[in-house]
Amino acid sequence: MKSGVLRDLAVGAVLVALLLVLPILFPKPALRDFLIYVMAYGLLAMSLNLLVGLTGLVSFGHAAFFASGAYMFGLLMQSGTVGIPVAMLATVGGTAVLALVIGAICVRLKEIYFSFITLAFQMFIHSIILTWVSLTGGDQGLRGGIPRPPFLGIDLNDAMTLYVFCVVVFILCIAIMRQVWRSPFGFTLRMIRDNPTRANFLGADVVRVKLGIFVLAGSMASVGGVLLALFVSGAYPEFGFWTTSGEAIFMIMLGGSQLFIGPVIGAVLLRLLDHFVTIYTDHHGLVLGAVILVIVLGLRQGVADYIVDWLERRRETRAAAASVASEKGAA
Amino acid sequence: MLSVQNLSKSFGGVQATRDVSIDFPDGSLTAIIGPNGAGKTTFFNLISGAIRPDAGKVVFAGQDIVGRSSLEVVRLGMARAFQVAALFPSLTVKDAVTAAVTSHQRKSWTLLQRFPLEGTQHRTDEILELLGLSSKANTLSRNLSHGDQKLLDIGLALAMDPKVLLLDEPTAGMGPDERWRMIGKVQHLWEVKKMTVLFIEHDMDIVFKIAQAIHVLKYGAVLAQGTADEIRRNQDVIDAYLGTDHHLAHAAGQE
Ligand SMILES: Nc1ncnc2c1ncn2[C@@H]1O[C@H](COP(=O)(O)OP(=O)(O)O)[C@@H](O)[C@H]1O
Ligand SMILES: [Mg+2]
């Protein structure tokens, strides 16, 4: 148990070091921008996977909370009444309340009905964003830029500072989600994923637990939205469109849903694919679709899950071979 | 004591339970028998809160629990294992039992500590030991043999530390030898844990050998009840079973 925490801390430290060293080694702004995108969308995909991979709740509407994060934060900052830290906390809190209201209705439904109603709520929120032009700027997005007043001596108008800030926030959220993943609560979620009826007969309050993780996942997604809004200095209705949720699901399918960090790997892969495919061809969706088809049909699971399973199988065959060998030696 | 009074339930035109009244004294080992479709599983569903009866009472822990959710019933101390083992396929045997123990300790919401919690290990080991599953602790539930899956299902129920344990056909789908091993474990459990155990069983030899009291259901109603000897001699039971159930006919003929 203790060793698990230590290992996670070590992995986290390596990840932070990597994220901080990369832009120093390759000081092109393009790489930094790429990584900020990966982190923002990575948080969206990671938080969605708390629902999909850990609880078995396939939400099609997760980007609603990503958008809520971006817009709430943008509007709070534009109001000029609060600093960045307070605005972030208020955004996460506000999104949690939104997720509580939406979740209270959604988590009572099962399987495909759950997926559909989350999709419906997302469309609802997307159309609010489009129609409430005086507040949100409608299809033009939240214009006029998002101010980044310095706080605690930190000035996010400096590109590198902004990048480091994103890394810190990203890693913090990953640490929180990792804790959820390995906590007793995380195992309650696995029980519900595998067999909700049985979980209920073992004293798990299935509906409330589902609501709990729905709120937590929504809050985490809103942080991704905040990072993106900070970076692009705006918020756009696409953040809450169904294609954004679809992208997050793609990331999970590409990377894998059972390895904790799988969705981030998926986010990296999808962004890389996006990047290179658009350079070489205009038929960008076609290539992307083909790659995903190959992975889904060929590996039948995400890349990270496939590698983990492959290592597992190899270890088992080796162990079996070793035990056969030692039996022979004994005989 | 668990006491069922005038319990009835219909599904559309099918009367699955008809006016059933049975008392299960504390610490008793009772068999529920009857042909397929007699309403045995439905009877368990009714008393465990999975479905609500049309009429009647289920008195448990001094209160009528009709209308309580299955969750509340579990928390009052009644746990069940299922006819088709209800497991968590992707969890290892140990993790599954530990998660159930954690849930029983009302710690399923614990977020700030890591799984497994220290206070659960001892209980988990005890349950695995009791069922002889210790050597398979790290096997994924879905990779267990059929017999071990049925055992694990019981193990999950035991994690609830139940006062009353409902076992729906613990020997379903097993060969003769495996059946006896399984039922030996059930009897051992009952002796060690001093629980009230209700089990559904088809094999009459097993029922006559270990049950203190036997209740025979047919078309949802109690056809007969009593000790093994009384049931063996009961003419209704012999009539109902002769020609339909080889085992009972055989067992009755032995007299
Ligand atoms: N949920 C249900 N809906 C409709 N009919 C049911 C349901 N559960 C059981 N039945 C019917 O009730 C009768 C008794 O079923 P069951 O209790 O499963 O029998 P047993 O366990 O004794 O084999 C059967 O006719 C079955 O079809
Ligand atoms: Mg049955």
Image: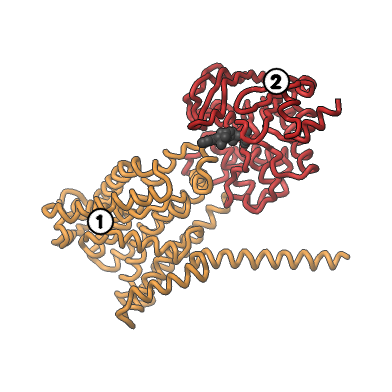
Chain colours: A orange, B red
Residue visible at 40% across and 64% down?
Answer: A250
Ligand 1 rendered quadrant: top right
Mark 2 to mark 1 CA distance (whole Å)? 68 Å
For this rendering, which residue is in front, B157 or A14? B157
> Which residue lies under the disc numbered 1?
A70
Q: Is residue B162 above or below residue A104?
A: above
For mark 2, name the chain: B
For this rendering, which residue is in front, A141 or B182? B182
Residue B225: mark: 2
Is disc 1 surrounded by few (<14), some (14 to 19) or many (20+) residues within 10 Å?
Answer: many
The answer to whether residue B5 is visible is yes
For this rendering, which residue is in front, A166 or A313? A313
Discs 2, 1: same chain: no
Would residue B177 be found to the left or right of residue B122 on screen? right
- Mark 1 lies on a secondary structure that is helix
Residue visible at 21% across and 59% down?
Answer: A148
Q: Position of residue B168 (x, y in %)?
A: 64, 35
Extreme bottom residue here?
Answer: A280
Residue visible at 20% across and 49% down?
Answer: A82
Would residue B118 be found to the left or right of residue B31 on screen? left
Is disc 2 surrounded by few (<14), some (14 to 19) or many (20+) residues within 10 Å?
Answer: some
Report the amino acid beneath label 1.
Ala
For this rendering, which residue is in front, A249 or B226? B226
Q: Is residue A60 above or below residue B21?
A: below
Residue A147: mark: none
